[in-house]
Image (cartoon, rainbow, N blue to C red):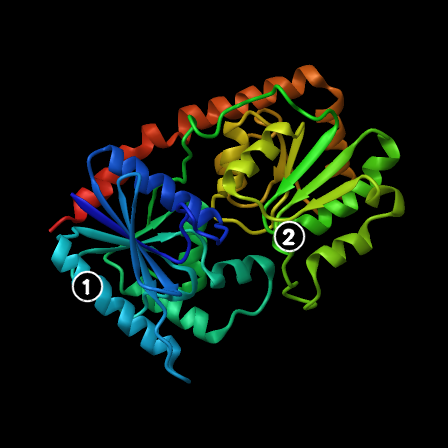
Amino acid sequence: MHVAFVTSEYLYVNSKKSVGGIGTFTKSLAEQLARNNFSVTIFLYSQSENKIIVENGVQIHLVKRKILKGLTWLSNRYYFNKYVNSIILKNKIDVIEAPEWTGFTAFMKFKCPFIIRLHGSDTYFCDLENRKVKFKNKFFERNALIGADKVVGVSKFVATKTKEVFKLNIKIEVIYNTVDVTVFKPNHQNIISNSLLYFGTLVRKKGVLEIAKMFNILVEKDNEVTLFFLGKDSKDVFTGESTLRMMKAILSKKALEKVKFINAVPSAEVIKFIQEAEVVLLPSFAEAFPMTWLEAMAMEKKLVTSNIGWAKELMIDGKTGFTVNPNETNNFAVKVLNLLNDKELSVLMAEEARNRIINKFNMKNSIQENINLYKSLKN
C-alpha cells in the first residue's frame, strides 16, 4: 500500500529549517510505515525548488512555491494540487493525508482518498487563546475539512473543539499522537542538578511568560535553581513585541542571572538538553496533543504541565508529574519545588510517565491503528 503526506515541515538530511510537532509526528509515522513495508511519499509544499530526496525508505518531494503577483495563494495551490495528482497517478498512491493548519488543501481535489488529521487549526488555537481569527484562515480551514473523505483527531479534545468552532456535524475518529520510545528514551547520566528546562518556540500560548513569573518566586526559595529556555523567539500575537524581550522584562534581576536562553538547535541536540534537565516545564495554554509532552514523558523526565483540555487525556496529576493552571503562579512554584526537593517521589513519577507512554502512546504499538485507517479508505 502507498500512503502520502502533505506538510509544510519535515526534517531530512541537509534541511535547514526547524520543525515543530507536525513535522516530528509526520516523520515518525512515515518511517514506521516504511518499516512496515508501506510505500511512503512526503509532499513538502511552498519550497524554494523542486527536488526529490529518498531517505529512510521515504520519498520526499520538495514542491516549489508558484508565485503570481497578487494571486500567489491561488497559483501555489493550483500548481501543488496538479503536481501531487500527477505523482498519485504515476506512483499509484492509495491514500493521502494533510494537517488542517490554515486550510492549505481547501478546494483541492486529489486522485485518491484524502484524510485530514487534526493537529490544531489556526481557528482552534485562536479560540483557546481568546483572540480573533483571520477570516481567510477560518474560511480555508473549514472548507478543507469539508472536502476531506475522513477527519481524524489527535485527541478527543481537539476533535470536540474543532467540531464546535467550525459548527461541523461530522464524525471524527481519534488516533492519539505517539512517539518512538526507542528514540526518546531515558539517559540520566549527565543531569544538571536543580536545572529546569522549557523547550519549544518562545510564544505566549506555550506559557513561557508564566514560567518567568513563577521563576521569580522560585529563586527566592532555592538559590541553586537554574532555568534554560531552548527555542527560537517569536513576535507576540497581542503586542507585536519580541516574546524574549517580554520574558526578560518580567524576570527579576536575581532570576535573570539564573536563566540561560538558547536559540533553536537540531532535533538530536534537543534530546541532549532534555536528558540533562532535572525538571521539564511545559505549561501550555493551547495544544492539540503535544509531541513535546510525549517526548519528555518517554524520556522519563520530572514534569510540570498545564491542566487544560487535552492534558487529562495524557497526564495523570500526581502520578506522571504535576499538572497546574499556569496562571496560578504560587502553586506552579510549589509543584516545581516538590519535584526538586522530594527526590524519591519525583523519580517514581518520572518512571510512571515513561510507563504510560510505553503502554498507551508508543508508536510501535499504535501503528496498527493508522494502518487500519489507511486500509479502510483504500479504493
| Residue at position x 28%, y 67% in the image | 80
Give the image location of residue 250, x and y in percent: 81, 53
Picture quarter containing residue 89?
A: bottom left
3D distance between C-alphas at marks 2 and 1: 37 Å
Q: Is residue 255 left or right of residue 167?
A: right
Res. 170 in view: no
279 and 373: which one is in front?
279
Which residue is most to the top? Answer: 344
Residue shown at the point (68%, 49%) measured from the top left: 208
Q: Is residue 134 left or right of residue 60?
A: right
Q: Amino acid at mark 2?
A: Leu
325 left or right of 11? right
Q: Image height check: is 89 above or below 363?
A: below
The local secondary structure at tag 2 comes to: loop
Residue 84, horizontal then vertical, whole percent = 23, 62
Q: Which residue is mark 1?
A: 85
Task: Give x and y (percent) for residue 231.
Answer: 62, 48
Q: Are marks 2 and 1 in contact (CB under 8 Å)?
A: no
> Residue at the spot x=62%, y=52% of the render?
232
Which numbered disc covers residue 203? none
* 22 to the left or right of 322: left
Asked if residue 36 is positioned above or below residue 379 in the image, the reply reads above
Quarter of the rendering containing residue 328: top right
Q: Position of residue 183 (x, y in %)?
A: 44, 29
Q: Residue 202: which numbered mark, if any?
A: 2
**Residue occupying the point 79% across, 31% down:** 225
**Quadrant location of the N terminus in the rendered image:** top left
Dot placed on the residue nearer the N-terminal end, 2 or 1: 1
Q: Residues within 10 Å of mark 1 (few under 14, many from 20)?
A: some
Q: Nearer the viewer, residue 95 or 315?
A: 95
The amino acid beneath tag 1 is: Asn
Q: Is residue 175 visible?
A: yes
